[in-house]
Amino acid sequence: MSDFQQARQILGARLSELRAEAGMEGKDLAAKLGWQPSKVSRLQNGKQTASAPDIAAWADAVGRPDVEPELQGLRAGVELKHRTWRRQLAGGHSERQKLAIRETDATTLIRALEVSRIPGLFQTREYARAIFDANARFREIPATTEQAVANRMRRQEALYEPGKEFRFLLCEAALYHRSCPKPVMAEQLDRLYGVVGMPRVDLGILPFGTQLRRTAPHAFWIYDRRQVIVETITEELWLTADDDIRLYERAWEWLAESAERGTMARRLIGRARASLDLA
């Protein structure tokens, strides 16, 4: 049984318990809520995920509005999707990059924070190749680097699609953290320099020493108001609960206040480029 299904069954069991404690049959509760009895059955048996309004209505109908916070917490646990890297990358990086293409295609607005590397949507082929090669060695997975790089380049076509918008924050450290040879990093910084000012792209850089309302915790990507994807060493977290999305939006907005854009952003990129001392 998956973590997702197990969490849904735990929530269902708690809903069933509260109904029973209220001395109600499933059909009675359904009638009170104006639902089909089958919906009550599916929620109790973990066959359907309750929405936030469903939870609030259930708690009120069984006379226990005090337990709504508990139930909403259980619901949030259902909506938290853990995707382990071991499972996702079992066959290499290529398939995960195809998923990234699908998610980007389905999204109008992407807001993201990267702390220590250049975002995939702005990477050059050689920089991406170095990242995929290093990660394949680290995770001891098949090296499907060429396919993964091709898919990453395919994903970047979204940058030129009308109707899409990309707002990125990048810690200045990412301009200096180098997991590739100096010439590759120089080419990557040149590419990033050109990204500043692109139509539909807003790139802000958080300089060393700037004052922040909140520190940058880790990289995250917000897809519309649909989900947030957070990467850890062991897994990806796909967060879809409204409260989680709002919190990450606030984190992005607070950080965005301190970001340098336009000419100053290019100056920071140029300074990092000059530090490579390729002359």
Image (cartoon, rainbow, N blue to C red):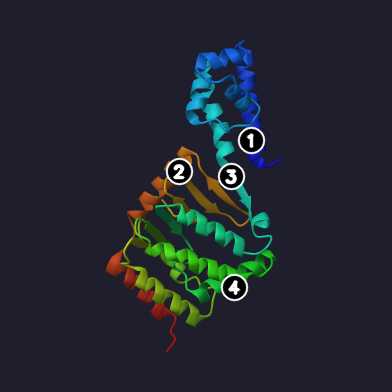
Q: In front of the other: label 3 or label 4?
A: 4
Check the image and report above or below for 37 versus 225: above
Task: Report which residue position mark 3 lands on.
Answer: 81
Residue farthest left in this picture: 263
Percent position of residue 33, x then y:
51, 17
Rounded to the nearest whole Å, what is the CA distance between mark 3 and mark 4? 29 Å
Q: Which mark is residue 146?
A: 4
Percent position of residue 250, x then y:
39, 45
Residue at image location 64% in from the left, 15% down from the top? 20
Task: Report which residue position mark 1 lands on.
Answer: 7
The disc labelled 4 sits on which kind of residue?
Glu
Q: Which mark is residue 145?
A: none
Q: Residues within 10 Å of mark 2 (few under 14, many from 20)?
A: many
The disc labelled 1 sits on which kind of residue?
Ala
Element type at marker 1? helix
Residue at image location 52% in from the left, 20% down from the top? 35
Q: Nearer the viewer, residue 253 or 55?
A: 55
